[in-house]
Amino acid sequence: MKKEGKFFGVLSLLDICVIIIVIFLALSAAFKNMRFTKDVEFNIYIDKIHPEIANSIGYDNIYSQDRRQKIGKIIAIEISDAYGYIIKDNGERVLAQIPDQKSVVLKIRGKGSFSGLGLTIGGDTYQKGSEIAFYSDNFRLKGVYR
């Protein structure tokens, strides 16, 4: 160390501290993002939508409506009749098919992670049963993470 407070005549102690902090922050950011490099698969359940909407869903990339971050790609689509409970005239509650309505289960594959908090994907964390609002180039929907 020279008399001017510089190492090797070029770097001061403050310069070295700043460089160490920048390297630490860069490594922290890299390690934080590494946990999102894993492929995860999960289902989104959409209940009681019109058949035309259900049939318009394709194998598209989907994005979070809140953050506009990519959630993943639809890899499977399962469309079935929608059911709900009705109350008959005698007061009995029965499960019945709802006319002109469909239920859809979308299997999604994306980059994320599962933890005790739930599914973290697209910058958001979802617990089982929570609602996900998402869109693609062809549709905008809300569903429930299962």
Image (cartoon, rainbow, N blue to C red):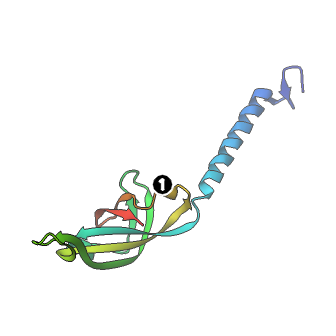
Please state the total of marks drawn on the protein image.
Answer: 1
- Using residue 78 as the reference point, say whether residue 70 is left or right of it: right
The location of residue 52, given as percent across then percent down, is 20, 74
Quadrant of the rendering where the N terminus is positioned: top right
The amino acid sitting under disc 1 is Thr
Q: Which element is circle 1 on?
A: strand
Q: Name the residue furthest left.
A: 89
The location of residue 128, given as percent across then percent down, is 44, 61
The location of residue 23, given as percent across then percent down, is 71, 43
Q: Quadrant of residue 84?
A: bottom left
Badge 1: few (under 14), some or many (20 or more) residues near its Cα, within 10 Å?
Answer: some
**Residue displayed at 39% across by 67% down:** 44
**Residue displayed at 74% across by 38% down:** 20
**Residue displayed at 36% across by 58% down:** 131
Residue denoted by label 1? 125
> Foreground: 79 or 82?
82
Q: Name the residue furthest front.
A: 90
Q: Quadrant of residue 82?
A: bottom left
**Residue displayed at 30% across by 62% down:** 141
